[in-house]
Image (spheres, coloured by chain):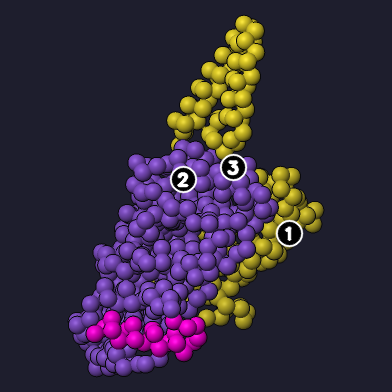
Chain colours: A yellow, B purple
Amino acid sequence: MKCDLCNKPAVVHEVIIQGGKSTELHLCAEHAIEKGLAVPAQQPLADILPALGGVVKVEGVIGKGQQQARCTACGCTFSEFKKSGSLGCPACYDSFMPMIAHVIERAQAGATAHVGRSPAPSKDAERVQHLRSKLMRELEQAIAAEQYERAAQLRDELKALDAAPQVRDE
Amino acid sequence: MSESFSAALTQLGPESDVVITSRVRFARNLRGFPFTSRASGPVRQEVMRLVRRAVEQSGPHADAGCNLRWIDLQTATPRDRQLLCERHLVSKHFASLDAPRALALSSDEHVSMMINEEDHLRIQAIGAGACTRECFERAAGVERDLARTLLFAFHERWGFLTACPTNVGSGIRISAMLHLPALTLLKELERVKRAARELHLAVRGYHGEGSDSLGDLYQFSNQTTLGATDDALLNEFHGSVLPRLVQYEREARTAAMEKARVRIEDLVHRALATLRSARLISAESAVRDLCRVRLGAVLGLLPTDLATIQRLLLQVQPAHLSVLHPQALEGDETERELRATLIREGLG
């Protein structure tokens, strides 16, 4: 089905009931955004982004400089994201604010924040943390007692804990 | 892997007259690493190492209730990669990539996890029939196990972070593969698809994104992943969406039998006759006709056993066929001949 306002495929279908009469509305992503309607996320992001860029540009939210915004953590630019639909790293979500908020809200039918669960605090994390502080105390005692062989061993054990950045250690 | 058959795809589950399979997948990424598309070879290897260690640490008494076997996709044979693809355990894209990546798979093949797909982790549980709740519990179990040793990328506002913002929030995609021949026959499918879009559901064909509706098989899944709790997502899909879709198709079957019984009888008997007589048949024609026979079986028009059809739907795929006939010479005609023989013998 084609968009009511142009020849592109319609992705938003609304039934408007006014004064007892119902009118069907079929719009492409671009015109749906113009009318302030949510665009379904099944629409490839690459299709939403150019339309969104246009609208947002009119609103003056994304300037030319912001289009070139670069994530300090991974080097990904907002233009690259617009092209591929894929962000570079978790830090991109903060690097590309507020542009990314527009993209998410459009793609997620207007939802503006996560309301589900958070990662559960881990018993392992507590265990690692407890182990680390115990090893640190023992290391201090070994150094004070001039037990250098023991101290070297404890240092190795601490290093092994640090070498596993993905083990919960907060 | 080669000798066994995926229980999820060959068994029958609740509402199996309409629902072929249910699936739940969690998208997760490791904190502190770039997403896969921007990750170098060594980073991808490191992600695999950390995930593998976490999988091995979770053990047999883990929440998931299963051990996951590790399959390195880079060293797997092309046939094994194709087998996994035909069983819907990996995406086509993932099967054909040339980069460090792996699959962790439970022995019953209900639970699997792609490592280094679009997201670092794609945890999936699949089951026969309408069983999204059970799938959710199993996938969530694996996720809980892994979260004991892995730190997932998480944002206070956006929830679990994913490479594509369309998956952010819960990162959960719930889907069901439905057989909708009567809605198609009555030309009601467009209306159903439109209603589905209004409910923020995506509708895809047999092989996922961009594929056609071969065999009148359609995959429905939630489009939005942000702004709803896991329970709300699950209750909406399992408690509301899925029963409604099943009901629509059942009503359409009743209506179609009243309005066009002879046409349906012709369709299903003709399909069975073709499958029982053909000496050469392509995978596509086989799936189409097997699905028509499936309709005949659920309507009581044909005595064919549904489980047999489910098994054949998988066995007629090229890689599965080559497992049954490893000695056969390669070639399109040989493949079509073996497929036709397999179906004739299977249907009796």
Crowding at mark 1 (Cα within 10 Å: few <14, some 14-19, many 20+): some
Q: Position of residue B136 (x, y in %)?
A: 37, 53
Same subunit, labels 2 and 1: the answer reads: no
From what the image shows, is residue B24 above or below residue A138?
Answer: below
- Asked whether the viewer can see residue B146, the reply is no
Q: Chain of mark 2?
A: B
State the SS at label 3. loop
Q: Nearer the viewer, residue B293 or B243?
A: B293
Q: Nearer the viewer, residue B243 or A34?
A: B243
Which residue matches tag 3?
B31
Residue furthest front as drawn:
B327
Which residue matches tag 1?
A79
Q: Chain of mark 3?
A: B
Q: Image point 30% across, 77% down: which residue?
A: B309
The residue segment tinted magenta is: B328-348
Kind of residue sitting beneath label 1: Ser
Q: Nearer the viewer, mark 2 or mark 1?
A: 2
Which residue matches tag 2?
B55
From what the image shows, is residue A93 above or below residue A9?
Answer: above
Q: Position of residue B216 (x, y in %)?
A: 38, 79
